Image (cartoon, grey):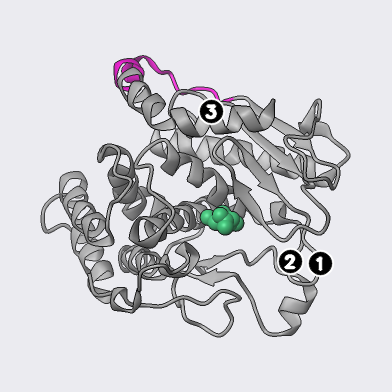
């Protein structure tokens, strides 16, 4: 059954990824990357039981949430394939599975190690979480991290894990709406705030350009030195989010063609590094920028400036 399948999955995941790494390397040049992976949709019908009832033909469903989630998940798969030459989150064509209408007025969305899960929101704090295409990409990016660095979900690796999801989430939204890094808003979760949140002056969940701003429902610290052990990963992702955003804005143009490629390189070419520190990531991204764009290139100095801004 589902929960047995899930715990088995967690037991096997590191081993699986090691095997997968070999498989992916061998087959990499054979992959045509012309097609997206299969995308499946399940309806929890306001219950907490997973995965729920599978929806046939989700692309033409009368349920706007189902239809939107199917389409947006496909767009994220296209983004991964076209921009990063990646075949689904595991780079081996894994089916992307989503459950919508999870629970009653459920105020969250998540990746549980196997699939995406979306609540409808209580309409006060949040609305339907599938309304945010950056939210959808954020959850899928947790899958991406799971099949690459496998960052733990505490302290510095946890902050990096959350930051990866915000970076790829926002990058996806910018790609989707063809926005320039220099003029984009860098808000996370701007499309999922409820009426009460808006009335109280909040405009987003997080702001990667100003992580500590008053308009953030979940404000974050700006500097690495402000991080302490035991803090929530959604809080400690502030400094790496600001580093990424600063670097992207300094270069301008398509975030996904420049700094995004650097971040992806570190994420996918550093092996399994569950305990990676922020300092490690900063060093590896400076190196990757030099490798991909040249030593003393504009991209390398932008990455350097980003990390310096947050004290790394
Ligand atoms: N929406 C949250 C996230 O994806 C759920 C969680 O706390 N893990 O980060
Ligand atoms: Zn997350």
Residue 229 x/y as whole percent: 36, 69
Q: Quadrant of residue 66?
A: top right
Q: In which quadrant will I find the N terminus?
A: top right
**At numbered mark 1, what does the secondary structure look like: helix, strand or loop?**
loop
Q: Within 10 angstroms of label 1, few (less than 14), some, or many (20 or more) residues?
A: some
Q: Within 10 angstroms of label 3, few (less than 14), some, or many (20 or more) residues?
A: few
Residue at the spot of label 3: 8
Residue at the spot of label 2: 126
Q: CA separation, marks 2 and 1?
A: 5 Å
Residue range (magenta): 24-37
Q: Earlier in the sequence, mark 3 or mark 2?
A: 3
Task: Tell me, yes or no, if residue 135 can be seen here.
Answer: yes
Q: CA separation, marks 3 and 1?
A: 36 Å
Q: Is residue 28 above or below residue 79?
A: above
Q: Is residue 135 left or right of residue 304?
A: right
**At numbered mark 2, what does the secondary structure look like: helix, strand or loop?**
loop
Residue at the spot of label 1: 123
**Residue plotted at (80% across, 64% down):** 122
Q: Are marks 2 and 1 in contact (CB under 8 Å)?
A: yes
Residue 254 x/y as whole percent: 41, 54
Q: Is mark 2 within 8 Å of ligand 1?
A: no
Q: In which quadrant will I find the C terminus?
A: bottom left
Between 112 and 8, the one nearer to me in the picture: 8
**Residue plotted at (45% across, 35% down):** 82
Q: Nearer the viewer, mark 3 or mark 1?
A: 3
């Amino acid at each position: 059954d589902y929960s047995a399948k899930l715990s088995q999955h967690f037991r096997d995941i590191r081993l699986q990824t090691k095997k997968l790494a070999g498989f992916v390397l061998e087959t990499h040049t054979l992959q045509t990357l012309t097609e997206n992976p299969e995308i499946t949709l399940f309806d929890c019908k306001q219950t907490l039981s997973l995965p729920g009832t599978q929806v046939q033909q989700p692309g033409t469903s009368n349920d706007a949430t189902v239809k939107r989630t199917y389409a947006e998940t496909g767009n994220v798969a296209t983004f991964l394939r076209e921009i990063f030459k990646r075949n689904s989150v595991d780079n081996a064509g894994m089916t992307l599975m989503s459950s919508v209408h999870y629970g009653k007025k459920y105020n969250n969305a998540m990746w549980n190690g196997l699939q995406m899960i979306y609540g409808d929101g209580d309409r006060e704090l949040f609305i339907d979480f599938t309304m945010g295409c950056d939210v959808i990409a954020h959850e899928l990016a947790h899958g991406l991290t799971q099949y690459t660095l496998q960052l733990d979900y505490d302290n510095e690796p946890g902050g990096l894990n959350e930051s990866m999801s915000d970076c790829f989430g926002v990058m996806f939204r910018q790609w989707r709406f063809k926005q320039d890094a220099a003029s984009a808003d860098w808000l996370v979760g701007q499309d999922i705030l409820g009426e009460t949140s808006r009335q109280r002056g909040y405009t987003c969940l997080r702001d990667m350009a100003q992580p500590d701003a008053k308009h953030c429902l979940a404000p974050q610290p700006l500097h690495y030195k402000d991080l302490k052990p035991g803090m929530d990963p959604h809080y400690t992702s502030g400094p790496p989010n600001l580093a990424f955003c600063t670097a992207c804005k300094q270069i301008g143009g398509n975030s996904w063609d420049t700094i995004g490629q650097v971040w992806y390189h570190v994420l996918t070419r550093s092996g399994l590094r569950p305990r990676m520190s922020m300092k490690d990531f900063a060093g590896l991204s400076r190196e990757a920028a030099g490798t991909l764009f040249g030593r003393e290139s504009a991209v390398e100095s932008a990455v350097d400036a980003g990390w310096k801004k947050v004290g790394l």
